[in-house]
Image (spheres, grey):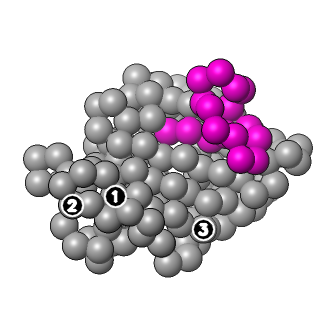
Amino acid sequence: MTREDVIDFLYAEARMLDEGRFSDWLDLWTPEGHYWMPLDWGQTDPIHQTSLLYEDQFMLRLRVERLNGARTFSQKPKSRCHHVLSRPFIDAYDPGGVTRTVTPMHYVETRLDEQFLLAITARHDLVVQDGALKIAGKRVDIVNCDAAFGNIQLLP
């Protein structure tokens, strides 16, 4: 695994989400991985503080099944998203352990006549399992997390 492999992986993840390939995206995760979206700026604890979401593999799978489901009437027509990534920073590089990245990005989600934009920072903890990069943890910080905004249907 090279640094370029890490950066390519992050862009590929965003592309999967933009293309609605949620099952492929779910395959990128380790079984014990967590997806966290803090409610407050600088929040340090996903367990004892309220978060926008803190999902394990079970909850991520339920989310993907809902998004892929034919009877998910709140997703007719389906929401779409678009990630615009800045070049990721690699804060810790350890091919035999955990590689940590920070990626500033803009996230757009749209459905019917509604569209909203979020400025976010995604932090990934990546590991190599069975010769492939996997997501052991992902934290998504919304820059204006203290503002009122509607439901986020997809995955920034």
Across and down, in percent, residue 117 comes to 75, 61
**Residue at mark 2 to residue at mark 1: CA–CA distance:** 7 Å
Q: Which residue is mark 1?
A: 99
User: Main SS of the magenta segment?
Assistant: loop
Q: Which mark is residue 95?
A: 2
SS for callout 1:
strand
Residue 75 vertical position relative to residue 103 in the rendered view, above or below:
above
Type of amino acid under label 1: Thr
Residue 31 vertical position relative to residue 152 in the rendered view, above or below:
above
User: Viewer-proximal residue, 18 or 4?
Assistant: 4
Q: Alpha-carbon neighbours of circle 2 within 10 Å: few (<14), some, or many (≥20)?
A: some
Q: Which mark is residue 104?
A: 3
SS for callout 3:
strand
Q: Please give the range of residues in magenta.
A: 35-51
Q: Residue furthest left?
A: 130
Type of amino acid under label 2: Pro
The quarter of the picture where residue 105 lies is bottom right
User: Viewer-proximal residue, 129 or 69?
Assistant: 129
Mark 3 vs 1, N-terminal side: 1
